Amino acid sequence: MNENNAKAYELRNLTADDVFPMFKIISKIGIKEFKACFESDEVKKMVAQSGKEGADLNALGMSVAIDIAGILMTNIGSCKEDIYQFLAQLSGMSKKDIASLPMATFFEMIIDVFKKEEFKDFFQVVSKLFK
């Protein structure tokens, strides 16, 4: 971050068009690993309670997002160029600009994508496939 505590980037809202590069990245990381994110006892319990009063869907989305972040960190090298392209599309920056970001800013950007409400909503919907 710069001296004014403003981020060096701004991410637009995720749209349907963003699903395709996300799937490309997921396939390079390994779909089985992502599927495992939805099979934990914690996620199954949250999904089972999703229709009940007091269900915490934000917690479900965040739980899955954290698991996915861990998988991404492990396998990030295999999809470096795809991630640069995806972040460039979300931020309006070039791939070269993304590649030259300080490490902390780069990972902050990835985390900000995971924290986006649209990202959590997407994975909440996808998790219903594994009920």
Image (tube, rainbow, N blue to C red):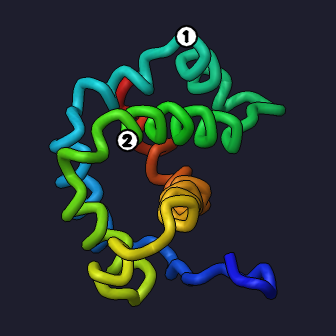
The number of numbered badges drawn on the structure is 2
Residue 15 shown left or right of residue 52 in the figure? left
* Vertical placement of residue 79 versus 35, above or below: below
At horizontal 43% and vertical 26% (from top left) the residue drawn is 37
**Which of pointers 2 and 1 lies earlier in the amino acid sequence?**
1
In the image, 98 versus 59, the foreground residue is 98
**Secondary structure of the residue carrying numbered label 2:** helix
Q: Position of residue 85 (x, y in %)?
A: 25, 72
Nearer-the-camera pick, 56 or 95: 95
Residue 62 picture location, percent across and down: 62, 41
SS label for mark 1: helix
Label 2 sits on what residue type? Answer: Leu
Residue placed furthest toward the top: 41
| Residue type (three-letter) at the residue carrying disc 1 | Asp
Residue at left 67%, top 23%? 49
> Looking at the picture, how far across and down is residue 24, in whole percent?
18, 54
Tell me where residue 103 appears, x and y as whole percent. 49, 61
Report the disc number at residue 41: 1
Q: Is residue 57 above or below residue 79?
A: above
Q: Residue 72 has which mark?
A: 2
